[in-house]
Image (spheres, helix red, strand yellow):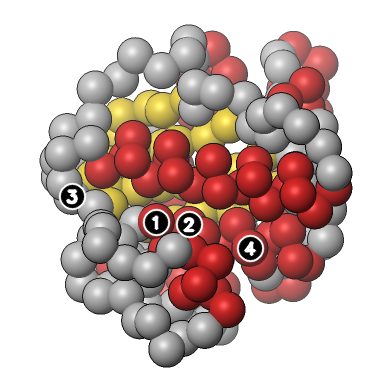
Amino acid sequence: MTLLEWTAKINLMPYRIVPFVNGEFYHLYTRGVEKHQTFADHRDYSHFVDALFYYQIQNPKPKFSTHRRSKIFPVDSSKKIVEIICYCLMPNHFHFLVKQLQDSGISELMRKLLLSATKYRNTKYNRQGSVFQVPFKAVHIETDNQLLHVSRYIHLNPFVSLLVKDLKFYRWSSYLDYIGLHDNPAVKKEEVLQFFKFPKDYEKFVLDQADYGIKLEMIKHLSFDEH
């Protein structure tokens, strides 16, 4: 599947009717209600990333707020309900590529994550109501080729949206983990990098489509709703 085909597919995808199966990969995404900005500063992004990796771990564990304030209450990171393969947070939306490990793992992760994000933002900004559109959208990844293209699509988001001129300077995605400039052990990058001899090869795979991706983004804004 090409980048063009994948861009068209996610823009035409209906609201979620995809069943979640253990051992399978899924592209998950949603955006702020009415396209509102959902991440305004460093703390917003940081809180959401921490929550993402916290809620991928099964219960029992301390409350997220308690865990974030103090590392005295550790969690067993080996007990996961999903694997986070890659992710990217954008000012008004996000993308995840995940693998479900336990029954209802994806549904549980997203329910708790979006609830946590809503409580955080409503408290911080003195607002009410949902922050993200629900239900979130999901696309089942059916082939290895699709897995690779989705990871590239996700990691290219900051570049094609003109947030940065160099992806190495965007910290709110897993791209830096993939190219060896960061090492978050909670990112299961091996699921994608196993198809490349070196991280540099993956970097080339992503950047080879960067300029093409910008052109597609321009077309998308003219033709489809933004995702």
Measure how far apart labels 2 and 4 are at the Cα level: 9 Å
Which secondary structure lies at badge 4?
Answer: helix
**Which residue is most to the bottom?**
72
Q: Is residue 124 above or below residue 23?
A: below
Q: Which residue, given by chain and number where applicable, does mark 3 sit on?
A: 101
Which secondary structure lies at badge 3?
Answer: loop
Q: Is residue 209 above or below residue 64?
A: above
Q: Which residue, given by chain and number where applicable, does mark 1 sit on?
A: 55
Which mark is first along the chain, 4 or 3?
4
What kind of residue is marked 1? Answer: Tyr
Q: Is residue 167 above or below residue 7?
A: below
Q: Which residue, given by chain and number where applicable, does mark 2 sit on?
A: 52
What kind of residue is marked 2? Answer: Leu
Which mark is first along the chain, 1 or 4?
4
Measure how far apart labels 4 and 1 are at the Cα level: 12 Å
What kind of residue is marked 4? Answer: His
Measure how far apart labels 3 and 4 are at the Cα level: 24 Å
Measure how far apart labels 1 and 3 are at the Cα level: 13 Å
Tell me which residue sits at (31%, 29%) in the image: 140
Camera-nearest residue between 199 and 158: 158
Tell me which residue sits at (83%, 61%) in the image: 41
* Residues tagged 1 and 2 counted as in contact (Cβ below 8 A): yes
